[in-house]
Structures are given as C-alpha cells and as structure tokens.
Amino acid sequence: MIAFLLAQTIAITGGTVYPVSGPKIDNATVLIQNGRISAVGANVTVPAGATRIDASGKWVTPGLIDGAGNMGLREISAVQNTNEGTLRGNEVAAAFNVAEGINPASTLIPVTRVEGVTTTLAVPGGDLIWGQAVLIDLDGTTIETMMVGRSPVAMVADLSEGSKGAGGGSRAGVAQRLRRVFNDALEFSRRGASYQRAQNEQLAASAADLEALLPVLRGQMPLIAVANRRSDIETALRIAREYKLRLILSGAAEGWEVADKIAAAGVPVLVQPMDNIPTFDALGIRYENAALLAKAGVKVSLMETQTENSRNLRQQAGNAVAYGMTWEQALRAVTLAPAEAFGVGGQYGSLEVGKVANVVVWTGDPFEFSTGVEHVFIRGREIPLRSRQTDLLERYRTLPPKY
Amino acid sequence: MRHLSVALLLALAAGCASASARQTSSAPAPAQATARGASQDSTSDERPQYPSTYKRHPNPPVVIRNATIMTATGQEIQGGSIVLRDGRILAVGKTVDAPADAVVVDGTGKWVTPGVIDTHSHIGVYAAPGTFAESDGNEATNPVTAEVWAEHSVWPQDPQIPLAIAGGVTTIQALPGSANLIGGRSAILKLIPARSVQEMKFPGAHYGLKMACGENPKRVYQNRGPSTRMGNMAGYRAAFIQAEQYRHRWDKWNKDHSGDQPQRDLKLESLAEVLRGNIFVQNHCYRADEMVQMLDLAHEFGFKIRSFHHAVEAYKIADILAREGTAVSIWADWWGFKEEAMDGIYENAALNQQAGGRPVIHSDDATGIQRLNQEAAKAMYHGLRAGIQVTRDQALRWFTANPAWVLGLDSIVGTLEPGKMADVVVWSGDPLTVYARAMQVYNDGWLVYDRNDPAHQPKMDFTIGREP
C-alpha cells in the first residue's frame, strides 16, 4: 500500500502557484511523483494515469513550517503526564534529544495539518540549554517516518529572562555559565578519552552534554538562542562570534532595535508577530518587529509558539503583513525561510523540482480567514481533512448528538 | 486616504459639512447613567459606593463620510455616513445632515463599526509588565471572595490599555481571575486614559459576579477544599444559602426599619444582589455537563446566569443555552491547553448562533483583545465552511451588540443607531479580514485613538522614558 501511494503521480492543475523560490505562476501545474515535486510550471505535461486535482481558482503554496512549539511532545499542557518536552533536573541538557518523546498519534497533529501547517519544529523546554530540537512532518505512524532530514536540526539555549535561575539570578551569570560549558566542551573535545580534569575540578556539565555540544561548536548544528531584550540579543551575537556558532535567534522581541547588527551577522530570526505586551524582558516589543527586521535584510521566519495554536501561523503571517511586511516576505517567512534556517532549504520550503512534496491548495490567500484549505499533501500523500475536531463537529452538528 | 489628522480635517470641515438647525436644536443629552434596569445597591447603607466619576470628554461634532458602515443591526451601508455629536450618534445612513462645525472624516475605502466590547478582560487587574507587583486578579485566599471588587485592583496606568484601544475596544468587563468558586465583582469600564478607575467606570452599569467552575478552583484549593467538582457545587450552594438569609434580613429591615439594622457583610451583599437580579453572573465554565449543573444551581436559587465564559463545549448544549437565555462568551479557536478545554471546535460560535443563542467572542487575553474582529472572522468563516448559516452582521454582533447585552448595556452601546453612545471604530478595511486595522477609535465621541496622529495615541505613565 505504501509503495503504491509513493508511486502515485498527482497533478495539481490550473491553480495560481506560489513557489516562493520565484514569482507566482498563473494557471500552473504542480506534479508530484514518488513523494517529490517533479514539475512546476504553466506548461507541464500531465502523465497519463496521474490523479488530477483541479485547482482552478485556487492558490497553491508549499506547506507551512512552524519553527516553534512542542508538537508531538505535549498533548495537554496542563496535564504533566502528557508532556515530554522538558528534561527536568538538568540545566545544561545538551544531550537531550526530544525525538523519542514524540507521539505520532497526538491529536494535535491532524488538527494542525488540516489548516495547512505541514512541518513543525519540536522544541524542548528547560533552563539554560534545553536540548536538541527535531523537525517533523505532520504525517507518519512512527517517529522515524516523521523526522525531517538530519534531525535534530538545532541545539536550543535560553538567554532571556527565563534562564536567569541557571545563571545564579543574573544575566551575566547566564552568559558566563554558557561560556564555561562551551569551554569545557572544547577542552573535552581536545583531550578526548584521556580527559582527566574532572578528577580535579568539576566539569561544567556531564560528559554526554559536553559531547552533544561539539556539533554546535564545530558549526555543524545551529544554536537557537531565545533572547528578547536588546542586550540579550547582543550577548547572543557576541557569544556566537566568540565561538563561531551558527546562531538562530528566537523571540527577538526587541530585535528591531538592533536589526542592522542582526542583519550584518547574517543571523536568521524566528519571530512571533502577534506579541506586543511589554514585560521587563522586552519593553520594546511591538507588532512592527517582523517588518522592520525584514526591511533591514534579516532572514525572518515567523512562528506560533503555542503548540495547540500552531495552525494560527497563517494568522501570524497576516498580521505581520498588516504591520508592514510585504505579503511575499511573509509567505517566505512561513515556508522557505524556516527551512533554510534549519538547514533543510534544499528539500523543503518551496515548490521546486526535487523537493519534498509538502503542498497545500487553498481557496484563496492563505493568510485570510475567508480562505479554506482544499487539499494538503505531505511527502506526496494526500491528507484526509479530518481531525478529532471535525469529528466532534459532526457528532454535535445537530442536537441531540449522534452517539 | 491614510491621513485622518484632526487638524487637517478641522480645516476642511467648514467646506464639507452642511448645517442642520433642526438637529442642532434637538441635541440629545449625553448617553450616560441610563443603563436599563440599573438600581441602587439595595443592601448597603447610604454611603457612596466608589461612584463613577466618568465625564464625557468635550469634543467637536464629527461626520465620517463615504464609508462602509456596519451597524450591527443588520445593515451594511455602502458609501454611508455617520454623525457623532455630544457623545451620541446623531444620524447614520446613505445621506445625513451634519452640523456645520463638524469635523469631516473621509471614510473612503474604510469601514465603520460600533466600538468593540470585551466581556472578559483582565486588563488593569493583571497589568503589564506582568510581575507579581501588578498581579492583582485572584484573591486566592478563600474559595468564596464575593466581597472583593475588581475595580479596587484596576491600575489605570496599565500599558495594555492603549494597546487594546488601538484594537478598537471601547468598553471592557475587567474580571477577577478564576481561582475561586466566586471570585468577586467585575468592573465595567470605558476604555479611556484616566487617573483613577472611577473615571473609567461605565455610569449605571451592572456589576458582574465572577464565578468559576471546574479545574481551577479544585486545583487551587485541593489541600483545603474544594478539591472536587462536587465540592465546587457544595461551595456555591453554601454561599447562596447564606445569601438568601442575608437578603431576607435586609429586605425585612428596609421595609419596616424595626429593630437593629442588620450587620453589613460585603460578601453576602454581592450575592444578595445577584439574587435580586442587580448583579449579573459571569460564569467561567468549560464543560457542557458543568454548565448544565450551574444552570440548575441558578434555578435552585432563582437567579440567571447572564453569560458562560470560555464555554468551549457550549455547542454540545446550544439548544439548552438558547432556551435559558444565557449568552456564551467564547474564543474562536482556543482549545487543548487543559483537559476541560480539549473539545474546543472552530464552529462553537456558529453552532450557538444557529441554535438561537447569543455568542460573544471574548479575549481573556491582552493581545487577543486587540483583534476580537479577527477572531470573530475566523469563527464566522469556519462556520460558513462547515455549512452553518452565519451572516457578517451576526459575526459583528459577536464583538459589539452581544457583549453589550452581556453587560446589560445594549440599550446604550453595541450598535450604530441614532441616540446610542458614540463608540465608533473606523477600520482601514473590512474588519472581518486579517489585514484591517483600527484607524480611529471614538469613545463617547472622544477621538481616543488615531493611528495617523501621535496626538491621539494615548500613552501610559509606565511607557514614559522607556521608549527605545
């Protein structure tokens, strides 16, 4: 059955195609073969026997990618037993890879994908170093089949107000502790098995955690640093320079104040546009953040951090446009930009030949409330537009309910 | 037409407005202190009860011309105009006569709606920047704290206030939190810059009484009780049994003034006012079965529940809620953050509307309050896609006229009709789209927000000296 599905050829015809990698194409065809996009354009020959999806009058985009949340790791946030995303008791949990905590049967997955979000980052939570985030496609019966590319795709650390406890109650302590951990990881790497220092002086983290940081310190794995205050963003940039890290900023609420510095450092940023409530972690928070960062040349991705609301990523994008982003920038910020930030830009985020066939057919502008989802393809498989919520609707559509 | 600067418009006003002596001479009294059914607090003595000192801000008349006007009474007038004077809506229609001195606002390409009303806000009681110092929303020291009044916590310098104003909000119900079975009295506020909460108190508005079902009270009080849903029910019942006796004592004394005046009890006074129908019950309750229990509680003691709040399962009992005349204040799509919120669906508002109920889109959130129009649009379009008939006017009423009813203010605010209070929003486009933003907000005729004019963008003290 799986082999049959993979071999299936699907032609989405007649739609207005937004490849993201290039300008929109009117009345175009997207051809899907073996789970990959095999052709995109106005003059595509549809092979005989292909399943045809008529997308006339519809909009066709890549599946949306949410670079935040705990999809699969959090069924009900208030119910501890259903939460897998945080390794408690370890403030430097670098070796914590969340993958095996993911529940492919989570009810949040269908609820999210039927609204056009096809890929999400599953992010750990924690104190100073949270652990390793994996990117998952929202389809599959096993963790292995959901994982994207070389997941884990990033290490996550917190340089915001939230991690102060791990720094003795001071932001300076947080930064110094992070450096001690990095230094010990490098030292550990240099001395390898003969490393004896632990006998004289306690290491800044366990051997497993130090080892897990080496791909980050070798520039092989990006470090997502949560930082909102301008000075915390600058600390993150400073540490990234010192250790030659591939930094991604997450949150960056006051990022607009130092947009030029972020742009100059070539650091991608994950932003949640619909936030503007001031806290002492970000007094300068404002709706225009995403637009101002993009204007300064920063590679902006948009995110929805509340896992169960991941489907509102498109509302986040719409609001980013309302507050100054161009529509094209916003579409890229929920597709190709996060794919590139997580190192899978060659496989995800645009409608290009050879890319993974995560494709959504919309009735119109994906950011508009009036727009519905007509078809969702994940790795070339058409996803039934059904979730626990659509089932509840049918049960209670007329009262008394259908038991 | 992005420049709605008042100075510019004042300059243009003389040339564009036409005088109407008749309308000028029949200027209505300001729409204040006329809330339907409002009555004196019947148990308290003669002392003033923190009275509203709200005063309408003096303003020139305004006419907004050539806009799409959604009245929330079933009309969507293309190329319409609306006249505001002395805090009242003077006229709405295709053609209107405007006073000669009216400021003329060009509404070309813009939409006009009633001011947004939120039945469920914690603005002021959980103020930004969100530290313990401003955490004044839950008196979580006893499961029944009917004696506390949210207005005594409201910080009028909450920096969330101007943000909500910029989202078109003109009236809020600031509620105590949901830690307690009975959390205390709500504050019904005009959302305007002010030095004291008294200046914001909506004149004549009914207080609400915050009650909470389910997980929150039993979690907060699990060690001392209630720790179960049956414990919750016993707690409400015990409180209202006491309140019945208290009401009886006071009613008797008020009638014959014989013997000693009964001792005043703030907790029971609030509950007795619920029994008299002077205070409206605003009930945080998620699950369908619990809402039915609460309706039975109301029957037992002879009061009405004005609105359930959050009510993510309201669609399962939409027929019962419609029959009871209890509104539902809900989110468009929040769900899943706790067990009693597991069964939330997009179509909740639409299904309740279809059943003849009274849905309200509420926020319970300082960012959500800034886009209640978007949330209503989301709920409307999901309903339509599911084949449920919902109109644009109904969706507009979800955040204007229906919340006005929940607060007992529907004869004063919530629609654009002559004689109503001039709470009006001018939107950059169709408010049921994601791209529309409030461009101007009038509260009782006062231009409290103008996106294009920094002179009409109120700031709170907290922001002073902290802007980057």
Image: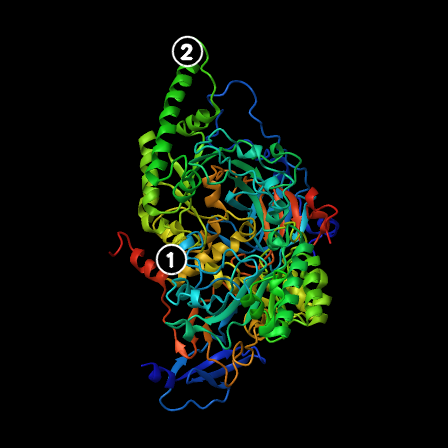
Dot 1 amino acid type: Gln
Q: Nearer the viewer, residue B402 or B465?
A: B465
**Nearer the camera: disc 2 or disc 1:** 2
Return the mark for residue B389: 1
Q: Position of residue B459 (x, y in %)?
A: 69, 46
Dot 2 amino acid type: Asp
Residue A365 shows in the view: no
Give the Cα distance between marks 2 and 1: 55 Å
The chain that hosts pointer 1 is B
Q: Nearer the viewer, residue A399 or A303?
A: A303
Q: Nearer the viewer, residue B447 or A399?
A: A399
| Vertical order, A242 against B205 (above or below) | below
| Vertical order, A218 against B260 (above or below) | below
Question: Which residue, given by chain and number where applicable, does mark 2 sit on?
Answer: B256
Quadrant of the image containing the N terminus of chain B: bottom right
Secondary structure beneath dot 2 equals: helix
The chain that hosts pointer 2 is B
Instruction: From the viewer's perspective, tell me whether residue B71 is left or right of residue A253.
Output: left
Return the mark for residue B259: none
Instruction: From the viewer's perspective, tell me whether residue B268 is left or right of residue A295.
Output: left
| Vertical order, A62 against B439 (above or below) | below
